[in-house]
Image (cartoon, rainbow, N blue to C red):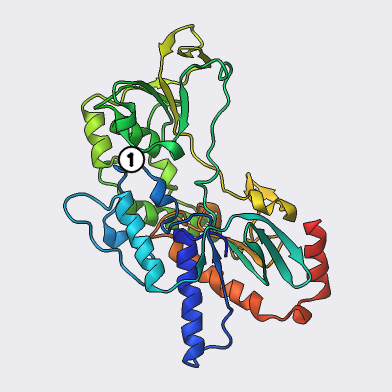
Amino acid sequence: MIGGGQAGLAAGFYLNRLRRDEASGRSGRAPTFTILDASKDPGGAWQHYWPSLELFSPAAYSSLPGYQMPARDGDGNPSAEHVTEYLRTYEARYDLPVHRAVTVGSVRVSADGYITDTNQGQWTSRAVINATGNWGNPVIPQLPGGDLFAGQQLHTAGYRGPEAHAGQKVIVVGGGNSGAQIAADLAPVATVTWVTRKPPRYLPDDVDGRALFQIATRHTRALAAGEPSAGDVGSLGDIVAVPAVRAARDAGLLQARPMFSRFISSGVQWENGEQQEADVVLWCTGFRPALQHLQPLGLTARNGVPATDAHLVTRSVDNTGLFFLGYGDWCGPASATLIGVGATARDTVAAAAERAAHAPSEISSWDVQSELTRGL
């Protein structure tokens, strides 16, 4: 398995369960497994978030399978630090075989399955669960004049809190949750200009992570069954009105402006010629799946992401031993969330274990040749 964040740990939980079932005689041979993680510390992407970030839901509704997240002391939902500690405890609790810091350079097909090349040698396996997430692949738009801008361009991935920006002029770009939350975070200490491509859309104030998970699950299941859907999360809005965002919005501190068209040396400029000075432009423009190491496989893309099986949305259509876990709805409803990744992790582990149980000689010659050809 590649990736030791929340998705990788959830899959590790179910792989461990197979080992326990094997030991007790309740199942056949369970596969051995290894989790390769690029970070030197446990916690996945959560260890890199800004300190004021909070979950959308209480701890009881934000847990991985098997072990409920402890409630946070004091008011509010769990913070990023609280989640990091939970994931660290979870990993230790189930004694998951995580190897750090292992950077994966490539995954290749072999006659026996897969070869994973890393900075710490090669791993061979009959199946690969890819759970690298999105954090390592931030999206930073390229606008005219960017090389002329004398200030700093920063992405959400590099934001560590408001203290470093006290007294600065900051332009926050992005109309999603991170854009609204960071603009609200900075408002008390900096001069903030919030820029969005379209007017901000807040979800109803009483909608939290529990409701989002339920909506996403109903929508995905309806589509899979060929039935009409009442709509996905996006039909309600783009921004969850967590307390800090709600307070800033109600105080008039989150007045969004349209997107600017170019950089100038001192800041940015709009199409009408209006200019705005800035010390920092902070891009809250999202991430793409971190899948660069899979390029040797020549995977088929669908809607900008690897195509997956209609019957098991985490399995690659090109390589029957390759699975994607935790990236978003395209590989399982709400699978990028703590509460949502468990169900797809369970199904993925079952399929990967079945695949791994077959000796190379039991895999059809067509299957092996097909995968080798795709890997060239």
Which of these two is toward me, 56 or 82?
Answer: 82
Query: What amino acid does circle 1 point to?
Result: Leu
Which of these two is toward me, 186 or 286?
Answer: 186
Q: Is residue 23 above or below residue 86?
A: below
Residue 55 visible in the picture? no
Identify which residue is drawn at 26% across, 63% down: 70
Q: In the image, residue 138 lies at what x, y percent?
A: 53, 39
Q: Which residue is situated farthest in the bottom direction here?
A: 25
Tell me the residue that label 1 is attached to: 203
Mark 1 Cα within 10 Å, few/some/many (few <14, many 20+)? Answer: some
Indicate left or right for 319 with 10 as reference. Answer: right
What kind of element bears circle 1?
A: loop
Q: Which residue is situated farthest in the left direction here?
A: 74
Q: In the image, residue 326 lies at what x, y percent?
A: 50, 57
Identify which residue is drawn at 34% across, 34% down: 182
Q: Is residue 53 above or below residue 125?
A: above
